[in-house]
Image (spheres, rainbow, N blue to C red):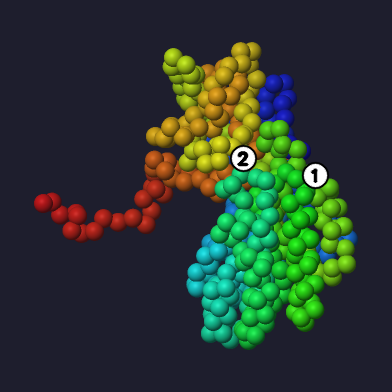
């Protein structure tokens, strides 16, 4: 459920009309509902009530400081994949002991930063990384708490670009090799084995892949325990899907009940890394129609947001609902909602039925709160958009719109190019 709804044919976020926000901050902009974000977090963590657990929001889904701060105040931690995401989480007030660090390409400086910060654990993605973290921890005269991220070779039945648990994917350590690497890890004096980790993919709409992964991880944990390697944490990652169109993913309560039952008998703390399921339907992208254009066989509606602002449709062919900000008496047509980017792949909706929008109309691109702004870019030298948070009757600018000056920050022209030939 989300808090975007119509009152007298005008779209509101909580108690604020979107048209009022657009008039004050301009378009495009991302808009998030505080009530929806809070409800999603509370619903998700309540699904695991009675089972020791920690909810670490996937910062890659939406790294805005205000959103990270909100989840931290609700008791959440952070799942990070870079030094920059760690920096963001700390600035937002996330407790270091609620931070888990995944990712296949951790740089030495990032590892040092995380060790000095005192994070909960590193999720190790390769044998070479295991050795590297041990070396760096030794130089710092400390111990690195680690889990091995296991690749269980399970098909999550999602888009291939966001599948991460198959043998052909770059992520994790093959489950057949895991025992060998755990045996090696316990011999290294600057590592402390504390967990087992796994993440099989994103936007998963069935329970079966999660349960299959749990079954394989339970077998591994029991094998480790028999060898005297005690596991305190089981990190199952994220991946629970949301409804963009016709999907019917499990409700968090159903997901939690199934996992709690599957984990009966294990004395561990469960770590979960939700991203999309918390933020996806809590945010939208608001854009304005610039022009309409008809060709012999297509109708285009050209808006001021493009693939640099929301990459998912171009990258994955993803579906986002297209809603009018103000409902008008106009026909429904089949059209493509496209942006100003110089790419034929620049579209937000392709060959879809939608209102016959006209110039100056406002359009809401729904379910954009996850992997929206966080994947945006300055392609075509376009400043990144503003981010807005609504709470009750008020709205807050939680990221200012970039200006042209931001586009050249850090750049310089060498002296030899300044001199005329």
User: To which residue does mark 2 refer?
Assistant: 368
The structure residue drawn at horizontal position 75% and vertical position 64%, both measured from the top left corner, is 217
Q: Which of these two is toward me, 128 or 348? A: 128
Snapshot quadrant of residue 55? bottom right
Residue 398 in the image, given as x and y percentages of width and height: 59, 48
Question: Which numbered marker is on residue 251?
Answer: 1
Badge 1: residue crowd in 10 Å (few <14, some 14–19, many ≥20): some
Q: Would residue 84 be visible to someone looking at this image? A: yes
Snapshot quadrant of residue 81? bottom right
Q: Does dot 2 land on a helix, a strand or a loop?
A: loop
Q: Choose the circle earlier in sequence order: 1 or 2.
A: 1
Is 232 situated left or right of 317 in this image?
Answer: right
**Number of residue marks:** 2
Residue 359 in the image, given as x and y percentages of width and height: 50, 20
Q: Nearer the viewer, mark 1 or mark 2?
A: 1
Q: Are marks 1 and 2 in contact (CB under 8 Å)?
A: no
The structure residue drawn at horizontal position 56% and vertical position 41%, both measured from the top left corner, is 316
Q: CA distance from mark 1 to mark 2?
A: 19 Å
Is 264 situated left or right of 68 in this image?
Answer: right
Residue 197 in the image, given as x and y percentages of width and height: 69, 65
Q: Would residue 275 be visible to someone looking at this image? A: no
Q: Which of these two is toward me, 381 or 225? A: 225
Snapshot quadrant of residue 249? top right
The structure residue drawn at horizontal position 20% and vertical position 59%, both measured from the top left corner, is 415
Q: Does dot 1 land on a helix, a strand or a loop?
A: loop
Is 250 situated left or right of 397 in this image?
Answer: right
Q: Is residue 302 above or below residue 243?
A: above
Q: Is residue 40 above or below residue 29?
A: below
The structure residue drawn at horizontal position 47% and vertical position 46%, both measured from the top left corner, is 377
Q: Which of these two is toward me, 33 or 134? A: 134
Residue 231 in the image, given as x and y percentages of width and height: 76, 74
């Amino acid at each position: 459920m989300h808090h975007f709804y119509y009152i007298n044919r005008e779209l509101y976020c909580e108690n604020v009309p979107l048209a009022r926000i657009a008039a004050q901050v301009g378009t495009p902009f991302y808009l998030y509902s505080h009530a929806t974000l809070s409800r999603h977090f509370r619903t998700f963590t309540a699904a695991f009530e009675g089972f020791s657990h920690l909810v670490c929001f996937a910062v890659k889904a939406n790294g805005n400081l205000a959103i990270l701060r909100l989840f931290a105040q609700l008791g959440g931690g952070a799942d990070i994949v870079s030094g920059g995401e760690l920096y963001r989480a700390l600035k937002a007030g996330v407790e270091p002991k609620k931070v888990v660090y995944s990712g296949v390409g951790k740089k030495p400086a990032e590892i040092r930063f995380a060790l000095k910060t005192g994070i909960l654990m590193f999720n190790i993605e390769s044998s070479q990384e295991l050795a590297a973290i041990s070396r760096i921890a030794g130089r710092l005269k400390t111990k690195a708490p680690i889990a091995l991220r296991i690749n269980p070779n399970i098909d999550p039945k999602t888009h291939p670009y966001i599948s991460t648990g198959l043998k052909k994917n770059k992520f994790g350590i093959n489950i057949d090799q895991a025992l060998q690497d755990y045996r090696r890890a316990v011999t290294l004096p600057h590592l402390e084995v504390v967990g087992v980790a796994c993440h099989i993919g994103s936007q998963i709409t069935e329970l079966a892949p999660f349960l299959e992964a749990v079954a394989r991880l339970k077998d591994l944990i029991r094998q480790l325990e028999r060898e005297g390697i005690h596991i305190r944490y089981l990190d199952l990652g994220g991946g629970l899907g949301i409804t963009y169109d016709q999907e019917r993913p499990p409700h968090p309560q159903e997901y939690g009940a199934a996992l709690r039952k599957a984990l009966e008998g294990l004395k561990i703390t469960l770590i979960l890394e939700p991203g999309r399921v918390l933020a996806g339907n809590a945010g939208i992208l608001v854009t304005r129609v610039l022009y309409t254009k008809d060709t012999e066989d297509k109708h285009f509606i050209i808006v001021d947001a493009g693939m640099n602002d929301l990459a998912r449709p171009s990258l994955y062919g993803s579906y986002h609902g297209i809603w009018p900000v103000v409902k008008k008496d106009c026909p429904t047509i089949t059209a493509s909602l496209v942006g100003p980017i110089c790419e034929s792949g620049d579209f937000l909706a392709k060959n879809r039925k939608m209102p016959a929008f006209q110039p100056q109309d406002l359009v809401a691109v729904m379910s954009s709160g996850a992997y929206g702004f966080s994947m945006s870019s300055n392609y075509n030298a376009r400043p990144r958009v503003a981010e807005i948070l609504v709470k009750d009757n008020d709205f807050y600018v939680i990221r200012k719109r970039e200006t042209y000056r931001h586009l050249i920050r850090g750049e310089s022209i060498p002296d030899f190019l300044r001199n005329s030939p």
